[in-house]
Amino acid sequence: MDKLVIRGGHRISGSITASGSKNASLPIIAATLLTGQGTFTLHNIPDLKDILTFSQLLHHLGVETSYSGNTLKVSSRNVESLQAPYELVKKMRASIYVLGPLLARFGHARVSLPGGCAFGPRPIDLHLLAMEKLGAKITIETGFIDATAPGGRLRGAHIDFPISSVGATGNAVMAAVLAEGRTTISNAAAEPEIDTLCKFLMAMGATIKGTGTTELEIEGTDSLNAVEFQNVFDRIEAGTLLAAAAITGGDITVNGVEPEQLKAVLKKFVQAGCSVETTLNSVTLKSPRKLLPTDVTAKPYPAFPTDMQAQWIALMTQAEGTSNITDKVYHERFNHIPELNRLGAHIEIRKNQAIVHGPQKLSGTTVMSTDLRASASLVLAGLVAEGTTEVLRVYHLDRGYEKIEVKLNSLGADISREKYNEF
Ligand code: EPZ
């Protein structure tokens, strides 16, 4: 197993290009299941464990993929199985994304119920609601979702999501593009990753109106084509790299990312005293001498994203005062806090709010990753902690960050990746 050994106290400064978006890649790769006409060429796909896991799932279904230099080629010509088994689905919740495309193209899908995750139950009821609205008959037995489209084809419908869900919106759109007739979706997730998925589906020949908004209208079609497509950059990785500069008193330019996709986060960096300049596809951040305490409430897009909540908490341990960070998406997404407190932070948790008392001098020690963004927050804290911080179980980090220590070292950090055994 790998750990990251971080020697703190180095300013992060310089220019770096973000990797391709993980959370846009996953639904896009799932959407290749929608057609057997030709081979897809997908560019700017990050080299991450989650992408490998998803490719393994597609191989299990009979899909051919090849990956090199951040380009993924996919052919779904010979899908032989419509079953996503537990041993693969348990590795990654986003496996549920095969449900919509398989059901839409083949009229049947059998997907293992995903497990829970480190920060609480993550239900899939909204995914099933959308499929049933589109006419699917769904049974849940022996841990599997078994979905069938009567007559082999889904029918367009109106779907009104009671809460905003990125995954359920992605599945609903991927199912609707091959359904018979029109589908309208209200309270759709407007996250850039879903906007990118819609653009990908439109490139394949789908007709979608309202992309990037919470109201979508999809005209079902009979068939779609394989295309070449350039994936967007990862806005959460970009936000994490900006936080690395801010927490170490440094400055950074992150290239590739569209500032609009990070608007709420950039606004908070400015409130915290950072100077932020943007171009069409880059963000430059200069940190202040002293960080100002800045409250944040994580909500669906375009608000501050829950995937930046843990990183923001790490940053606020260095602010001159108290900051309140509330997560309205995942109320229990605070596993990073006990570990940050072991580094010397003073953070309290009250229901779905963290109260961060700063500034606190952090001192390096061994800390445990529990989930992807929690591990990112521990790395950020390690960058500013005095002495050496060892972040264990970095397989969590590798799910969503492409060679993060290589990127940070190129900006002045002193991090090594080392093997270790856990008893
Ligand atoms: C996506 O997860 C992201 N993952 C998550 O990023 C991100 O935190 C989340 O969206 C919110 O932005 C991927 O895109 C692969 P949701 P998803 O459905 O789709 C509730 C990361 O760090 N809900 O938008 O699973 C749910 O419990 C990962 O990269 C239901 O109640 O999230 C949550 O409270 C972590 N029923 C809220 O909706 C459902 O059927 C939002 O979840 C589905 C969700």
Image (cartoon, grey):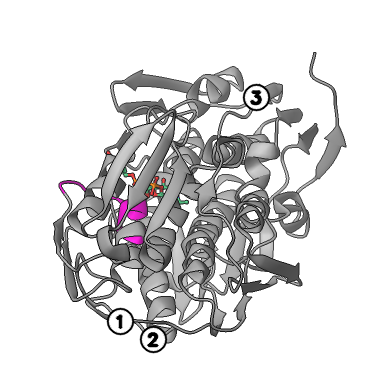
* Mark linked to residue 221: 1
Reading the image, the residue beneath label 2 is 205
Q: Which residues are magenta?
A: 162-170
- Mark 3, Cα crowd under 10 Å, few <14 / some 14-19 / many 20+, is some
Q: Amino acid at mark 2?
A: Gly
Q: Amino acid at mark 3?
A: Met
Residue that appears at 23% across and 60% down: 188
Taking the image as shown, residue 173 lies to the left or right of residue 402, namely left
Residue that appears at 49% across and 24% down: 337
Taking the image as shown, residue 41 lies to the left or right of residue 281, namely right
- Mark 2, Cα crowd under 10 Å, few <14 / some 14-19 / many 20+, is some
- Percent x, y for residue 318? 51, 36
- Percent x, y for residue 231? 54, 74
First in residue order: circle 1 vs circle 2: 2
Residue that appears at 71% across and 22% down: 365
- Mark 3 touching mark 1, by CB under 8 A? no
- Percent x, y for residue 268? 36, 53
Where is ligand 1, by quadrant? top left
Quarter where residue 330 is shown: top left
Q: Relative to 354, is 158 above or below?
A: below
Q: Quadrant of the C terminus?
A: top right
Q: Amino acid at mark 1?
A: Thr
Reading the image, the residue beneath label 3 is 368
Q: Relative to 219, is 139 above or below?
A: above
Secondary structure category for the residue under label 1: loop
Q: CA distance from mark 2 to mark 3?
A: 46 Å
Residue 164 is inside the magenta segment: yes
Count of numbered badges drawn on the protein: 3
